[in-house]
Each structure stands twice: as structure tokens, then as C-alpha cells.
Amino acid sequence: MAHVHFASGQRRLTGGVAEVQVEAGTVRELVRKLEEMFPGLGAHLDETSATAVAIDGYIIPDAMYEPVPENAEVHFVAPLGGG
Amino acid sequence: MTATEERPDYKYVGTRPIRHDGLDKVIGKARYAADLVLPGMLHGHILRSPHAHAKIVSIDTSAAEAMPGVKSVVTGADFPDLGAAPNGDLAKNVIARDKVLYEGHAVAAVAAGTRREAMDAANAIVVNYEVLGHSLTIDQTMSPDAEILHDGLITRGIEPAPTEASNIVARTCFERGDIDQAFAESDVIVEREFSTTPIHQGYIEPHACVADTGQDGKTVVWCSSQGHFRVRSATADVLGWDTSRVKVIPAEIGGGFGGKTTIYLEPLAVEMSARSGRPVKIVMTRDEVFRATGPTPGSKLKLKVGAKNDGTITGVKAWMAYENGAFPGNAAMLGCMTVVSPYTMEHMYLEGFDVVLNKPVNAAYRAPSAPMAAFAMDTLLDEVAENIGMDPIEIRLHNCPSEGDPAPYGPKWPTIGLKECLEAIRDSDHYKSPVPENAGRGIASGFWFNIGEASSATVNLNENGTATVVTGSPDIGGSRASMALMAAEELGLDVYSITPVVGDTEVVGFTDVTEGSRATFATGMAVVEACRDLKMQLRQRASTAWDCDVEEVEWVDGHAVHSPGDHEALSLAAITAAAKRTGGPLGATASLNARGAGPAFSTHVVDIAVDKETGQTQVLRYTTAQDAGTAIHPSYVEGQMQGGVVQGIGWALNEEYIHDADGRMENSSFLDYRIPVASDLPMIETIIVEVPNPSHPYGVRGVGEVGIVPPLAAIANAVHDATGLRMSDLPMSPPRILAALGEAVE
């Protein structure tokens, strides 16, 4: 089960829930299941930040097909660039 | 160097060979985009808006088109409207459509036989404007009375969503714990308001490109950029072309620092080349670079920090507004994500506002948004330390995050090296030495994420046993040397037997732009992966020659070695010389989306003297400690550290955009926009800290950005130590310091 954490700005779509546990093999599956749990959240993540996902502390861009390890800590974060 | 664990016994990694591209640059032979001359080439010039905000009522190009030498004139009407597509705003920034949004916004472009003819023709274009009200400050643009820049801009992140447009792009919020409880439990609370102005990256080479569009509908672009694949896709998008019609050849780059991660000129040159049937060159002047290319944003920050008497930070509340220039961006969000990253705390409430206003749209600048945030946070932490009588290093060590602690933006920290940076400064000769007379000392830390993203590399072995390493990352800080060193380490080849090349968009696989301190990390991973593939091929070729199982062959220091010892070792050169007989030429390609970018931290100490009669500051000594993970080429790591510091010093002490009341920039030259020069500064002392990133084969983190984060606060803290002044508005220029000294006396 992945431990999915929601930033305060995302919790308006989870009814204030800050963390859920989800069984998912990939980020795409995870987003689908989150959409089932919190209708509208999947679309929000797609639009805003799902392309960057932090899994166990490391931020991964374009992560939709990324495997989600057992007991992974998952955060959806904004895509990053830099100079 | 300071390392947390014994470095593996590398032969090449960590050495300091002269960079492969060094000689050409020293003797002036390196080719930059502006150097290129093609037969029949035209020269382009861009007509720019004199107004900060105006509707374009009409454009009459007829007089210009009739002028001598003019071969093409284009306006926004000649380019597709991309609407809300991903590069829609970029297209409108390249050339204005119905409105101009800042002074310097491109309105039309001319290609003619000479630059003079193009300039004269551009001046003959008649543009009728309806001038609108403009906003140049965060307060102005957030005001309910502000003239709206974009009619459809509804602020994101506010519930319920506003029904009317404003200049506020988005509200971002990061919240943890109970901030009111934090302040209730605090022994010390400090709060201040800070401001910074836009700062330009100040690269020495202005933007330049040459485009040659053929009758087959394809174009070749030579340009200075940090990412020619992004130039390709963005140029194609702005033109409404298929990407495959655009080939981009990277020229040498004369500095970028984030400012060359976007495009300004290329679609204009391509379109005018297509219309004229001739190559078109456009080179910006310094004035254009200042007026029309992206600076880093100005900001207005209000921070409140609570702490216990033992130095424990109880909580931080932040209100952070960042300018994004004329089009929406996410500068404030990055500010929120970085502002308290060097510290642990149970409670925080970080609120960010991105705004648009009538200035050039932001471009990245080393660790975008983080320096302003650190300026506020580390100034206040210095004030807390002063109030409770604690050493500024000790308070930072006391609140220092380590692996497994939650970062303020959510995830737990992986392996990081902030503690080691703080200890390196604490133990440095600089910090142990007494503060010079009539001077002050300041400390600050900084953070930047670093990123991975997509990279490709091809490594070809030549018949004489040398190698060519082709990557898609423009070399903006010595990355070719780093790629060669990693390849040398893998293959066991002398580093000068390797030629590192930056390939164009048609000879190497897709590679994301060189940003986020990613080139040596991510593209280096691709080089290592390709080399490891090659080593397997080399072992197989040796096994073919020896008629043995490949598992009996090892690759040791550039040689195939038969483990049972039945054959004499074969050198790489011997294998490549016989390559035709054993299966053909040897080469390997790797393409990857790099994972595991290691966060970067840095801590700085600076001694500043302040002349209280003139307000003049002088940097007496500056030392930076930065976690590089592993320094592949220490000289270029040090160069990045020093470059970041020097740019931060300019930001802190002198640099600022000055506009008149009509929104026109008044200091668009290096005479009036003062960046530090060598004679202004002492040698910047560097301490490379090495806490290896476990996700990279050599432990690389990336070093290009975090060095610019601490200087603003470190210098402000030193100025306070020297004068007693808490400077909260940048730059801390002589007039500002003198005024503050005067106010302090009154």
C-alpha cells in the first residue's frame, strides 16, 4: 500500500483528508483510484501537478507510468524547472 | 574538500583536466551564433513597444516594405494564435498580437540586407497604440483598481473561485501544524517586510540566432540556448509547424544562468527566412536584452518567525508575493517551497501570490525564487539568534533537517548534506578568524531542489581507440569536461582520448533543457549507461577473439582481461582496431528520464566593510560551502559556486531595474546596471562538501544553482553586524545604506 499525502492546497478536493493508503502499481493507477475516492482530484492532479510525483523523497518528472513501490511515500508536487 | 565517506578510488573523476573546449574559447576561435555568416544572409531587427501597456490599434508596414534592402516584414498577424495551448503565452511574448504588455515587447520585425537598413525600416513602421494604465509594482498590480493585463485571468487557488479577472495568477498555500500555537509557545518572535527588485542574469553574450529556411519547408536554426530541443519545439509551436521541420544546431553559449531556457528571436528569424528565401540573422543589443528578456522576479515578502530561547524554531508564517512579469508563472509557489527548507519546524503557514504586471516576463535565474525567500528567512533567523544570544551557525545546526525529516513541500528528505555544509563553515579558517575591524560578518544557508528529466548520450569508439561522447546538453558550465571524465572513468581511457561533443537535434536523442542543475547529473547518467553498454560489447569482442565465454572476460582499467589468465589482456585500442573482424564498429546510445536528483544545500560566510560616510560596502572575504554530492571536475564545481556567489553579491548590493513613471527602463546598459567585476571582489573561497547522492552512479547532485541562494541574506546579516542596520529592501546600495544610517541616527 502506498501512503499518499496531500498538500494543504490539494485537501480542498479530499474533504480535508491529509493522507490515504492506496494499493497501486503505477502512478497512473494511483491517480485513477484517487479519482474514484475523491471525484475531481484526478483531474486536478492531471491539470496541475501529476506530472511530477515525489516517491520516497525523490521528485520524478513525467511520472505517470512510474512504478509505485510497496509502502512508498507519495506526494504530488508541482513540476519543477530551474536555471 | 569535505567528504562524509571515503571517496572510491577513482582515476579520473575528481581530477582537474583543462576543458576540451577551453583553447578555442581562450583564443577566440569558439563559434557563437552571432559569428555565423551565411551566403546571402539578411539581418533582422525588431520594433519594440515604447509603452508599458497599450492596445495595438493598427500597424502599417507599407513604408517599411518599400525601403531599400528590405526583404521581409512580419507582425503578430503573421503567426498563429495558439490560444490556451501550452506555448500560447510564449507565442504572444515573442511577438505581440492585440496588446503590448511591457516596454520592449516585440511588435514587428524586419529583415534587410544590412542591419542599418533593417533598423531604418523598423522605424518606418507606423503603429497606432491606445495607451492603457500600467502596473510596475506588486502593490499596484494587486490593487482592485489596477488595469487588468489579461481579461481571462481568474486567480487559481482561491475557493470559491473569483468571478472576475485580476492580475493575481494564483494563491499557493503550504500549511503544517497550528501556526497560532507556534507563536503562543515562542519565547522570541521577529517579523519584517522585505522587498527585492527584478534582476537580470547578466550573461555576457546577448541572444542571437541565424535561421535558414529552405524551399522544402524545413529550417535550420543556429542559436545560443540552454536547450536546443526546447528551442526546436517552442519555435515550431510558435510558427504552427510540425517539430520535424525545425533543426536546431547549438552554438557555443556565452552565459545563460537560466535566462536562455526560453526563446525570443527564433520564430521571427525562421518566418522572415521563409518569406525571403534567404538566411536571417538577429542579434540583440544589450539594451534589448534588458528591456525584452526575462529577469528574475521582484518580490514582496512578509515573514514572521517564532523560536524558543534554546534556538528551536517553533513556526514560520509567510506572505510572499512574486512578480511574474507580463505573463503568468509560478514564481511564488517556488518561493513557498524553498523558504524554510533549510530548517525543521512543526508549524508553518506559507502563503504565496503570483502576480502579472507590466514588465518583461520572468526567465529562470539559478534557483529561481529561492534567493529572495532565503533573504527574508535567514535575515530573521539571524535576528532570532541575536536576540537569544546564540551563534548563527549553532542555531542553524540546531534546526537542521536530516534524512527522513519532512521537507516543507511534503516529501521526506533523502540523503542531504546541509549539516555538513554548516560544519564546514563553522570549522573553516574564515569563520575561526576574527572579524576585521570596522566590518561585520554574516551567515546564511540556501536550498535548491535540483532536477533529473530526460537526457540522451551516444558514445562511439573510434578505430584508433579514442572515443567520441555526443550529448544533447549545451555546455554552460564545463559539462563537456564532466562528461569526458565520467566516460574516462568507465572505459579506462585517458580523458584527452575522449572528445565530448554537443550534438544537434538530428544527431543525438532528445534531451531536456540544461536547467535545474541537471546536466552533469542526468546527462552524466546517460553517458555512464552508454559506456557500460560499450564495456559489455568490448568484453564480448574479446571473448570472440579468445573463443571463450564472455563471463570469463572482465574490463579492468581500459583492458579486457581474461579471468582464468589464458590470454594476454587486450587494450581498448586493440579491440577497436580489430572491430570489423569481430562484429563491426562499436558504439552505444542511452536515453533516460533521470530519477533521484539529489537536493542541494549551501552555507556561506561573508565579511563586509561599510563606509558610514558614503554607504559604500566592500566584500572583504567570502567563503562558500556547498554539497556537490561528488565533484566530477572540482574546478568547474568551484566555478559554479563562485559564479553563484558573485551574482548574489551583485543582487544584494547593486543591481536593480529602474523604471520611469511611464514604465520605461532607465538603466538598460552595463554602465548604469552595475554588476560586480573582478576588481570589486576578493577571491571567493570554496569548500566542496561531498555527501554522495545514492541515486547517481558517481554520487552527483548538481551544483549550478544553490550558490546564489544564501548571499543576499548573508550580506544583509554582515551589514547588520557592521552597522546595526537591518536592511530589508534590496539592493543595499550606497544611497540606501546612507539613508538607513541617517534614519538610525534620527
Image: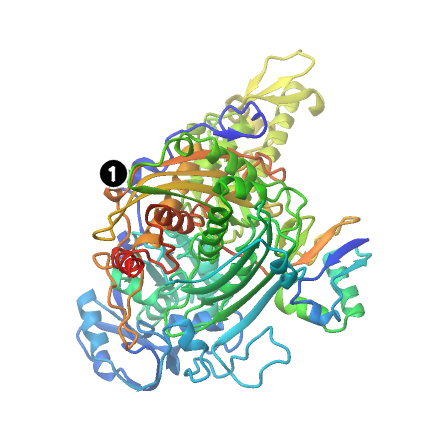
| Whether residue A68 is visible | yes
Against B548, is B228 above or below? Answer: below
Find residue B433 and report its horizontal and vertical position in percent: 38, 31
- The residue identified by callout 1 is B27
Front residue of B57/B185: it is B185
Q: Residues within 10 Å of mark 1 (few under 14, many from 20)?
A: few
Front residue of B692/B160: it is B160
Front residue of B726/B639: it is B726
How is the structure coloured here?
rainbow
Q: Residue sitting at 27 percent across and 67 percent down?
A: B44
Chain where mark 1 sits: B
Q: Horizontally, is B683 left or right of B573 in the view?
A: left
Q: Horizontally, is B354 left or right of B398 in the view?
A: left
Q: Residue sitting at 51 percent across and 73 percent down?
A: B169
Against B689, is B154 above or below? Answer: below
Identify the image quadrant of residue B633.
Answer: top left
